Image: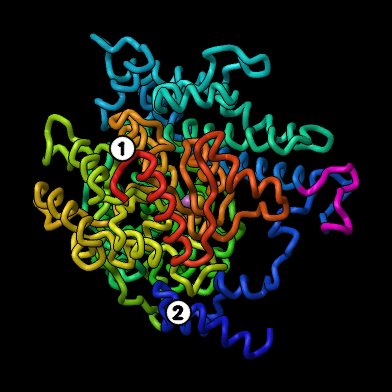
Amino acid sequence: MKESEKVRSEIRIVKDSWVNSDLLKKAKKDGVELVFHRFEAQQPQCVFGEGDVCCKNCWNGPCRIIPGKQDYGVCGANADVIVARNLLRHAGAGATCHTDHAKETVLALYEIAEGKAPGYGIKDKEKLLMFAEKLGIKTKGRSVKAIARDLVYEILEDFRRQQGLFVKKEGTYLNWLRIRATKERINTWKKLGILPVNADAETSHILHQTTMGCDADPVDLLLSVMRIGLVDGYSGLTLATDIQDIIFGTPMPVKSESNLGVLKEGYVNIVVHGHVPILSEKIVEWAKKLNDTAKKVGAKGINVVGTCCTGIEVLMRQGVPIAGHVLQQEMVIATGVCDLMIVDLQCIYPSIANVAQCYHTKIVTTIDYVRIPGAIHIPFEVDKADETAKKIVKLAVDNFKNRRKNKVFIPKEKAEVWTGFSAEAIIEALKKVNRKVPLKPLVDAIKSGDIYGIVGIVGCRNPKVRGMRFHEELTKLLIKKNVLVVGTGCWAHAAAQEGLMTPEATEKYAGAKLKRVLKAIGQANGLPALPPALHMGSCVDNGRIGVLLGAIADYLKVPIPALPVAGSAPEYVTEKAVAIASFFLALGLAVHINPVPPVTGSKLVTKILTKDLEEITGGKVLIGTTPEEAAKVIVAHIRKKRKELGLKV
Ligand code: NFS
């Protein structure tokens, strides 16, 4: 890289408010390579990959499409087929992340029901009973464990049902979709023939469908993307969240802190990283129990903080502070005070083991299919949860003495965050305004235009858009226009660090009308105001957004696509994000996606996703490559929906 380019790239890095330049300098001195450095080393990135017109599905290839020169791969597949096939594979891979996550929790519930996981219980019995009753499971006079076991059996049906798989039969589709989606959506999906039958079979089936010499119809492939979106939405996201709520409790509002400043110098710092709360909940519990042990080694106590989505899980339910989003995971270690980072699955950079080598940090992997050379592997099983968590926390305590004082630097930045806004928590807050019909104040505000619309902003942070502060700026632009923002995942880290998840943010950033509504609801709940950016949870908690929108649509007696709402993934990175976007599109939402999704290599696929899909599911992809452009297209979409509903624009 030329010297001038190097300087430019460093300026871009430092421009991000979440990058502390002193920490960056120290990391450089310590010999640490960060995500930005590797990103720069990868430039220029492959243009064929960007348009997704590269096919590596067979060894006639690899083939790539150059319009007018090489219009077909060796087998005859054109750009439309290659792009649609690749998109389906990405969505499928993303959906398996969420269905595996959901299964981890469902199988944990089974162990609990069988009395084989003594470390865990059932915290939200009401939710368990609600789902059991919806699925026709007898509840009267039965023990909670017996009901939980039957619930697990019904859920597992969604992963093994064969009837209706290849020969479609009426009425055979996912149980969890049946009890969590709106009737109108189910009918629409039924008409389209995209109701999934078996989550595992659907995700493995698409590998067959997209192999050389199978499905060559881009439209059919895109309908399958929608079906996979539903697998992701119901057998992944919503199921994972619902079962986690049953085991660990449904989140309710709680205050905490965010950003690297939550690490504490005198304390044993344990960082939980990944996605599934089964492990992190136990670590939090054992850190409290072993707090005095830490004092014996000269520490003031144990400080557990989180990164990425597992951090959010323990933030939402226990108020554990969050240290950083996906792009900050290496920086957490570069502070020199991370005594142990414990990871479960997904979004864990393999590079953390290299960064840890520059410090005393121990990395502990816990899932058998997620291993990192250089890390210590301690398998985590629910039946031995307590002894394993205790062992890991002790490992961290023992490592405190190895900290190298000359390598310590903790950035001061930290911000208050109000979190825990599950759909139930939002309804509870609204009940303080209208006990009998809690949705009424929210819907009335939408109708009057005091809340112009609702936008769910979700997903990763992408090094491609750094320097732009997309999450932060887009959120501010929307709330200024009286749009209520809800969201999850790394967006939530960004919004929290920017101070957007506080009652004060309402005063500072919200448009006058939105401010009035949020103040009224907040004051009914003993707060100066509700925050204008509501933290609904981790990435799997995107299912909560679906449930909330479904409730609003049912209340208004209109389909979800008719609502003045939209979704946005302004810095998406992962295949999981592709699956989530597919779910939102199937739900009938307009979804802003940035960077521009990898479909531009096909004019047909681009046209279907940005235009024609609206006539099919009601959803469509919106493009906006700056926060200003994105806010403009999103607000224009909301305006259109308001007009169609006959509401004030
Ligand atoms: Ni979701 Fe993106 Fe990862 Fe969580 Fe963050 S990167 S797709 S937000 S941590 S899953």
- Of residues 429 and 338, which is closer to you in this image? 429
Amino acid identity at mark 1: Phe
Question: In this picture, is 3 found above or below 399?
Answer: below
Which kind of residue does numbered mark 2 sit on? Answer: Lys
Residue 486 location, x and y as percent? Answer: 34, 50
Q: Which image quarter: residue 197?
A: top right
Residue at mark 1: C-beta within 8 A of ligand 1: no
Q: Which residue does the image show at 56% across and 80% down from the upper left?
A: 31
Is the magenta region chiefly helix, strand or loop? loop
Residue that numbered label 1 is attached to = 248
Task: Assess whether residue 283 is covered by the magenta stretch.
Answer: no
Q: How many marks?
A: 2
Instruction: Please tell me which of labels 2 and 1 falls first in the chain.
Output: 2
Residue 373 visible, this angle = yes
Identity of the residue drawn at 79% across and 44% down: 57
Q: Which mark is residue 272?
A: none
Q: Quadrant of residue 48?
A: bottom right
Mark 2 = which residue?
A: 15
- Residue that sits furthest to the bottom in the current view: 3
Tell me the crowding category of disc 1: few under 14, some 14 to 19, or many 20 or more residues within 10 angstroms, Cα based: many
Q: Secondary structure at mark 2?
A: helix
Q: Is residue 5 left or right of residue 85?
A: left
Against 421, residue 533 (above or below) is below
**Where in the figure is residue 245, as x and y percent of width and height?**
32, 35
- Is 248 rendered above or below residue 573? above
**Residue 309 x/y as whole percent:** 42, 51
Region in magenta: 67-79
Res 1 → quadrant: bottom right
Q: Is residue 128 left or right of residue 80?
A: left
Q: Which residue is located at x 63 percent, y 75 percent?
A: 40
